[in-house]
Amino acid sequence: MASITEAKESPAQQLWEQVNTVHAGMLGVDGADLHMQPMAPNADPKTNTIWFYTKSDAEIVRAIKSGARAHFILVGKDHDYHASLAGKIEVRNDASKVDEYWSSVVAAWYEGGKKDPKLTMLALHVDDAEIWVSTGSKVKFGWEIAKANLDDEKMPDVGVKRHLQFA
């Protein structure tokens, strides 16, 4: 369960922890004539980068031009955490990152393993993000809705929104 207190006090740390707990989010290249697609993230908080395995002949790879930007959307596993991350995206054939994040799940997608000729990676260099964290408590949610319905000027207090900028 996502913590509202952590979202207020350490939103960047919480963001990277959440990125590492989801199996997949939705990745889209800004300005490309493609729908967003599910991709499994591998976060590197030290560099504010999310790495994705893909195949060199994938549509999303062809859509990435020099200087391209992308958005990655995630919903936490308990549905009380939502984030939209944005930044420059590039295709990177980085053997050290292939090794760092390699797993049996990734291996299942590549017949040639780490040496598969179509294996490549995408690097999303996150420079901007927004997060929304909501209460997981049904009691608190119900109480806040009831209070808001009794007072036209009262809005339910069920979470927090934060905007983050990364260098």
Image (tube, helix red, strand yellow):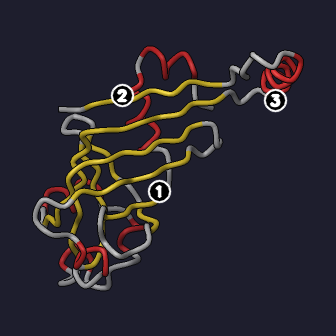
**How many discs mark residues in the rendered view?**
3
Q: CA distance from mark 1 to mark 2?
A: 18 Å
Let me know if residue 99 appears in the view: no
Q: Callout 1: 10 Å neighbours few (<14), some, many (20+)?
A: some
Image location of residue 142, percent across then percent down? 85, 26
The amino acid sitting under disc 3 is Lys
Q: CA distance from mark 3 to mark 1?
A: 25 Å
Who's the residue at 81% across and 29% down the image?
A: 138
Q: CA distance from mark 3 to mark 2?
A: 26 Å
Whether residue 167 sits left or right of residue 78 in the image: it is left
SS at badge 2: helix
The label shown at residue 12 is: 2
Q: Callout 3: 10 Å neighbours few (<14), some, many (20+)?
A: few
Dot 3 corresponds to which residue? 138
Mark 3 and mark 2 lie on one chain; the one further toward the N terminus is 2
Mark 3 and mark 1 lie on one chain; the one further toward the N terminus is 1
Who's the residue at 32% across and 85% down the image?
A: 111
The label shown at residue 25 is: 1
